[in-house]
Image (tube, rainbow, N blue to C red):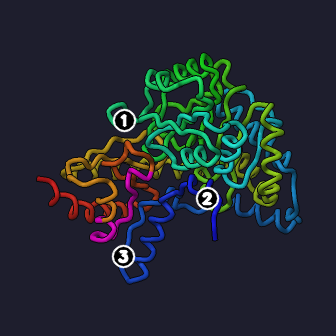
Amino acid sequence: MRLAERMDRLGTENAFEAAARARALEATGRDVIHLEIGEPDFDTPANIRAAAQRALDEGWTHYGPAVGLPALREAIAADATARKGFTVHPGRVIVTPGAKPIMFYAIMALVDDGEEVIYPDPGFPIYESMTRFVGGRPVPLPLRMEHGFRLDPDELARLVTPRTRMLILNSPANPTGGVLTREDLERIAAVARERDLIVLADEIYGRILYEGEHVSIAALPGMADRTIVLDGFSKTYAMTGWRLGYAIVPEALVAPISRLIINSVSCTSAFSQVAAVEALTGPQDEVEAMVAEFRARRELIVDGLNSIRGVRCLKPSGAFYVFPDITETGLSGAELADRLLLEAGVSVLAGTAFGDVGWQHIRISYANSRERISAALERMRAVIEPLVV
């Protein structure tokens, strides 16, 4: 069957392909330690599950408003106002089935053929993929290890051209765990205001933060009306399978994005939105416990990786990933990822799954138990250290 030419411009997310390879190896009887998928390994808190069950019993099983149930939009607005540092009106909140559609809708609504989107490299692969799909020109902005995997605002300014339409930020970041400082964001905001850029701020990991503060660029002067804030429930509340995200958008984007939702998914499931209200307004102790456990795992994996000859690993400030440099092995990240899977039964991702900057890096998700992380580190040591002269 002949596909439309635009399909050649659409990329993928390699984490799912890597996980499939790992499961295929497991099916042969091999023990595989999964460090590839960016998914909390915790259960959704019981109070949220119970709220969903009650919602089903109460009949929340029908279509709802395209932009989300009023009760959830109000709860998101209140939570965002308290946590993100700027006043959020419920009318500017849009609920979607997962946070990823926000990337689709924002880029589709705003980027014309040939217009440029600056995105982080390394960064979430869908940023580049969706930009190409709509006919835009993706422009990578390098995030370098020597700068803590934070973007350089001066380099950003040099990349902006008259064709630049959008800047994508992600802090805390996938795949590096890097976090932009308030000073970074103030300088970035100055560029956005001066050059009339729309900002897509991916803040999905905003509550998984180990030190410092989470600053939303939308809270800075003049930025709320040029920023689309992307957030959701997958990471904070271990709700990846629920597919529940949201955006806070400038008022002018509410109607266009609503039309895109109506033309694609109609609405987000009602019972899951009722559960999301409970997530935001109910007890937060399980979220805090999850972040504390991720912090302990961070210490374990960073110390363990840095004890392996040939590996250099920065300590991330947020999210639940590390992005170690493996240059001294003499292998690319893709080559090492293959060897770790086949020889050691450890599934990680090649750094190039997130952009060209990562060609001598691998991404490791520490969303696994401390016991399994410790076992993975020893298996990795056995493969890596013999490679280093």
Counting residues from the N terminus, which is met first, the one under dot 3 or under dot 1? 3
Left or right of 207? Residue 335 is left
Q: Is residue 316 in view?
A: yes
Counting residues from the N terminus, which is met first, the one under dot 2 or under dot 3? 3
Secondary structure mostly seen in magenta is helix
Give how far across and how far down residue 171 sits, in percent.
Answer: 52, 37
Say whether marks 1 and 2 touch (CB < 8 Å): no
Q: Quadrant of residue 335?
A: bottom left
3D distance between C-alphas at marks 3 and 1: 34 Å
- The type of residue carrying mark 3 is Asp
Label for residue 31? 3
Question: The N terminus appears in which quarter of the rendering?
Answer: bottom right
Q: Residues within 10 Å of mark 1 (few under 14, many from 20)?
A: some
- The type of residue carrying mark 2 is Thr
Q: Vertical placement of 291 versus 25: above or below?
A: above
Which residue range is magenta in the image? 339-353
**Tag in front: 3 or 1:** 1
Give how far across and how far down residue 289 sits, in percent.
Answer: 53, 51
Q: Vertical placement of 260 versus 201: above or below?
A: below
Q: Residue at x 86, y 45 (%)?
A: 70
Give how far across and how far down residue 351 sits, in percent.
Answer: 38, 50
3D distance between C-alphas at marks 1 and 2: 29 Å
| Residue identifier under label 2 | 240
Q: Residue at x 44, y 24 (%)?
A: 155
Where disc 2 sits, the SS reads helix
| Residue identifier under label 1 | 144
Label for residue 307? none
In this view of the protein, which residue sits in the foreground, 231 or 387?
A: 387
Q: Residue furthest bottom?
A: 28
